[in-house]
Amino acid sequence: MVNIPDAWYNILADLDFALPPDVQPDLPAGDRAGGIDPQVPLSLVRQEMSREPWVPIPAEVRERYAQWRDTPLRRATNLERALGTRSRIYFKYEGGNLTGSHKLNTAVAQAYYYRKAGATRLAVATGAGQWGTAVAAACQMFGLECHVYMVRSSMTGKPYRRTMMELLGAQVTASPSDRTGVGRRFLAAGDHGGTLSVALAEAVEETRTPGTRFCAGSGETYSLLHQTVIGLEARAQLAERDVWPDVVVAGLGAGSNFGGLAFPFLGSALRGERAVRCLSVEPAACPKLTRGRYAYDYTDSSERTALQKMYTLGHRFTPPAMHAGGLRYHATAKVVSALYDRGLIEAAAYQQREIFSSATLFTRCEGIVPAPESAHAVHGAVVEAARADERGEPATILFALSGHGIFDMGAYRSYLDGEIADDIVPDAAIAASLAHLPTQPVSSDV
Amino acid sequence: MVNIPDAWYNILADLDFALPPDVQPDLPAGDRAGGIDPQVPLSLVRQEMSREPWVPIPAEVRERYAQWRDTPLRRATNLERALGTRSRIYFKYEGGNLTGSHKLNTAVAQAYYYRKAGATRLAVATGAGQWGTAVAAACQMFGLECHVYMVRSSMTGKPYRRTMMELLGAQVTASPSDRTGVGRRFLAAGDHGGTLSVALAEAVEETRTPGTRFCAGSGETYSLLHQTVIGLEARAQLAERDVWPDVVVAGLGAGSNFGGLAFPFLGSALRGERAVRCLSVEPAACPKLTRGRYAYDYTDSSERTALQKMYTLGHRFTPPAMHAGGLRYHATAKVVSALYDRGLIEAAAYQQREIFSSATLFTRCEGIVPAPESAHAVHGAVVEAARADERGEPATILFALSGHGIFDMGAYRSYLDGEIADDIVPDAAIAASLAHLPTQPVSSDV
């Protein structure tokens, strides 16, 4: 395991400012969902708050990482040739594990910490199934039971995802279900298709069962921390080739993929060691950094969570239909938001058609089909290469290929058939959503 | 590329006997399909005949191999723990490329040689789509056009495979089609669902188009040669850990997966360097080695091909329904057959239910879902470990995990639902099929 880092990197240690604290919404106390869920193990709460630069990766977690890590760092020479660029394009590929994406990095860590804190069972919610699959795999590793509430319409449309989770020993329940009060209410109201929001509420309700904890993980600061294993590996792999990137590019949803690759590089820059640009790429259909507002907002549509200061399109924002389901979140992680607010990272938004065009070229050149989410980074890298060439200063580009798209042939089919439409969000839609931002917070949570 | 071999290993060099020559069937000359197809490039014909121990891998092919090789060699420590075995179980994983299996190793080599021989376009036939995807990817690499005839019933049932091939730039036609005489005959007769046999005939007919060649590749001696990159890497990776296997286990279809992993080890044994057992695992539903006959037979059901001496169940044999479609071939490669006939390799046949049971345990332990074909090797390794423990002599076992099964959730679903049946072939069915073996060949092809 010499090539797997022995500690995660905590970017908070290299910031000369503190993150704005979470605050309680202006609600009667009984209606509040709390800041950091009190059920979250203390070990994870400490990671969320820590300013120590390095958090040791437990030996049991590293041992499991070794099932698929270190992951490949490759140069896309065929893509470079096809583009005719003089820039160098590298990518870090996280799709080579069972669950097909980077999400397993934090799922394994979380399952470990929950187990250590005495949990015997994790309840999670999943839409298309990626997070559910990752947690199911992680629970299997540490002898935890796993109960997944899967949005019923997804379960019908993607039955293989359910099978995969069951193969990994998880119990899978279609949501809304009659197992929970929330579920029964929605069923009684005639809603059988479900949404992620309902599935989340059911999984949270499930924690009334002794030993059961709810587990979520893509925008929390500790999720970003766990994902830095990606960037740390990439930095070491590039160093072996005497390479340092001019720009690091990653798709941006809730933030863990972007933070995972970019933070270790950005940390070097913040410490004044080496300069680097960090570019996040978001869909034009969900442009939280490029067109959102830096403000306190709810983290989900229940309007019961603590408020976090984030770049947000408003918690009621509904993006147009798009294939990169993982990038539909209305906001992004508070760490990423703070960095963007201070000009320490960059953001770009692109449209689906151009993104799939770059992804298709990449597939033909490099033999990996990018997930639609990851395709954003592919396109970002392609654009960066072209701009560098135009400037007459070929660049060294590193991007995050966070997952494979072999389960996304439907999206590629639409692209090949010319059926992918423009997806620019009208200004009015964003303004309408931002009008529902909560009013000034009343109390600090810290 | 230091870890990718620079030459393939040719086991013919270490045999103290010659393979029985192919012979022409007892047909009017105009009806014969020929021995080695005259369209096959001379470079491949030479590889088929060579007795040189090493065949250099062209630099262009190695460069493409580097897109996904070397492939992981891992110890299945969690599986060992779950089994409670004192044996050590290693596996070599070939599923980490776009096409999801080892087939790309020979597709890349063949595309290279066909291109060098002046072909501009390859026509291939595919059932479920694996071989078509591999050749499509390989054609894309070397600037060849690719035309895939895909069995229509598969194309309807597995639309994502078609999309994948088109994404790789291939033209995909449902077979039977109206593009060929053969296809039109079947369509006129009311057969629209198709079979691999018809698709093969259409692809062969397509070679009347100038520049177009037909390309097949799983049982040819040169395919087995190209696959030895697997075993050569595995041998080097084990040597780094000071490990030599007592037994090498691989699933057996037409032979290229088994030969690819086993031959480099077997070669060492044949040269008297280190002892090793090589165990092939076949489905009880298609038991060509364990219950077939070593005899001259046609290589497909057209009864027009040259005759090869192989272990065969008869070219009219139809195995019961099973999930490992890649292991349904009625016979196996002539090299593998000759080795078995001389007692140089071993064979075992297992049933689907026990195979899926081992594969499910493996998934939960090691985080990779085996393809149903590869699951045969998983089960073979599990049985070998148990036997070694019983003997009180823990063994070191290496098996071939030739591909992933994430497209095979339907098969696993059946297993989880207890719907996988026994699949022992009755003696009478084999006897009936063997009764149709061709009569004594009349002339040598060599």
Image (spheres, coloured by chain):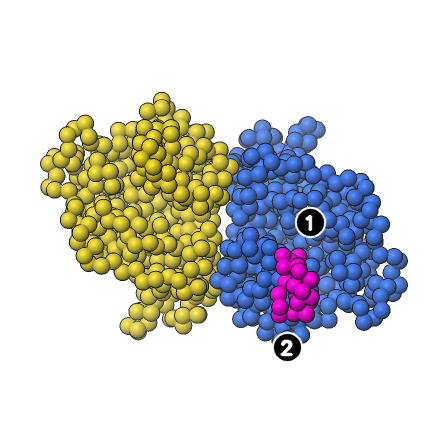
Chain colours: A yellow, B blue
Q: Amino acid at mark 2?
A: Pro
Label 2, residues with CA under 10 Å away: few <14, some 14-19, many ≥20: few
> Please, which chain is the residue tagged with disc 2 on?
B
Q: In the image, what residue type sits under mark 1? A: Arg
- In the displayed structure, does residue A85 sit left or right of residue A165? left
Asked where in the image residue B82 lies, by quadrant, the reply is top right
The relative height of residue A372 versus residue A66 in the rendered view (above or below) is: below
Query: Is disc 2 in contact with disc 1, using a CB cutoff of under 8 Å?
Result: no
Residue B328: give its label: 1
The residue depicted at 57 percent of the width and 64 percent of the height is B173
Q: Which residue is mark 2?
A: B210
What's the residue at 62%, 62% (across, down)?
B175
Residue B185, magenta (yes or no): yes
Q: CA distance from mark 2 to mark 1?
A: 33 Å
Would residue B137 be visible to someone looking at this image? Answer: yes
Locate residue B231, reporting x and y percent: 63, 51
Q: Quadrant of residue B77?
A: top right
Q: Is residue A314 left or right of residue A78?
A: left
Residue sticking out furthest to the top: A210
Q: Residue at the location (75% across, 57% down)? A: B301
Q: Residues within 10 Å of mark 1 (few under 14, many from 20)?
A: many
Stretch of the chain drawn in magenta:
B176-196
Task: Report x, y in % for residue B339.
Answer: 77, 50
Q: Earlier in the sequence, mark 2 or mark 1?
A: 2
Front residue of A219/B46: it is A219
Judge from the rendering whether residue A68 lies leftward or rightward of residue A191; answer left or right: right
Please say whether residue B339 is visible from this viewpoint. no
Is disc 2 placed on a helix, strand or loop?
loop
